[in-house]
Amino acid sequence: MIAVSDILGNGPELMPNIVVIVATLLVTALLFSKPIEKSGWWAATAVPLASIIGSGFLVVAPILQMSTGRMAVAAMLLLVTLAYMIGAAIRFNIRYVEPKLAGGTLHRAPYTLEILSQWALAFAYIVSVTYYLTLFGDFLLRGAGMVDPMLSKSVTSAVILFIAFYGQHRGFNFLGRFEAVKLGIIAGLLAGLVFGNTEAFLHGVWQLPAEHVKPGWHEMQMVLGMLIVVQGFETSRYLGERFPPQLRIRSMRYAQWISGGIYVAYIALMLYYFKYPLPPEGQDTAIITLSKHIATILPVMLVALALIAQFDAAVADAQGGSGLLSELSRKRVSTGLGYIVIAAGGLIIVWSSNVFEVIVYASKSFAVYYTLQASVAALTALKHEDIPHRYAKFFGFSLVASAALSVVVFGIPAQG
């Protein structure tokens, strides 16, 4: 039999593991409780929140460590702020553009950009499915103690084909139950980080890592190329059949506040652990290696989190993308054929790119969509006199569109 000490460890290993496990169980139990499960605001918040957190929570720390060093918190703040600005444009579109679209009164200029943005989103889904499953393959191999780019590509390709041919016939409805587990494990990781930083401070050994990166324009470009890690808030725009507009607007704001706070706190707490060198290969999954210094039980938990989160996100985007392609083509492309299109595009990207290039492609593809959505907001404000403070909104959303466009133009892979 496996003893409890075999799982939790002994001596200095014991307490961090207990902290992580207790926090994970408490938050998971809370999110599975009936009051939370039946809460309308939480249901509307959980979808974008889980999407944002699932987009890149596990890859962001080692990549920021590699590309920005001590400036990682500032870089994370930049990404969170940019995402919130883009979110403001999409919230505007929920409030003003959706009713005008439904009523057929939206001005031709923003209407044209709205249609273009839907095509951009369909393409972004193809790239994001590839991004999620590339990470799935890397984390699966990391969990088995391997780093092998070619084998990872093969695993990714197999899972892409599985989703394409199985998902269109059977579906993956059971995955929604894992949201609470994912957020619970993240809470456990954060609790372990708080405990580790507190212990280091009390023992007088807490210090920032030695500076190895001099931030400049090159590093800024790498940060812009990581926009995908805070992507996912736009899902509120497409929950109209489940939730009313005001609830979607409010819940998207909540999701961005919560995820932004989690991301910034996570990176700030990880600074102390940046003293441990990254592995020479597989930096995208290096959090698995780093996490053993936080609590010895975390590597296993984070591999499980990564596999669940990436597969769940890939399935959701494959379903969304295939449905969107069918809708945009006016049913000329069936949902089943949409899966095949996504799979074909994904396979091309997988075998022509490394993981850091895929991250940038995903960031840029969503940045195109965000640029168009912000432009829709700007032109709607300009062209419709019933919108209050419309010139200020036009100017503000034009700046947001320019900021999103900068990701498309200037973003580069973290490897440089």
Image: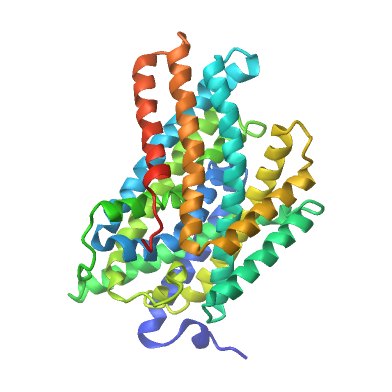
Figure check: 236 above or below 1: above
User: In which quadrant of the rendered image does the C terminus lie?
Assistant: bottom left
- Residue 90 appears in the rendering: no
Q: Residue furthest toward the front? A: 352
Figure check: 2 above or below 386: below
* Residue 151 or residue 285, whichever sits in front: 151
What percent of the width, then of the height, locates residue 388? 40, 13
What percent of the width, then of the height, locates residue 105? 59, 12
Q: Quadrant of residue 311?
A: bottom right
* Residue 196 or residue 116, whichever sits in front: 116
In this image, 334 relative to 91: left or right? right
Q: In which quarter of the image is residue 382?
A: top left
In this image, 400 relative to 140: left or right? left
Residue at the image point whose x is 31% and y is 76% from the top: 276
Q: How is the image coloured?
A: rainbow
Residue at the image point whose x is 51% and y is 26% from the top: 93
What percent of the width, then of the height, locates residue 4? 53, 85
* Residue 171 or residue 147, whichever sits in front: 147
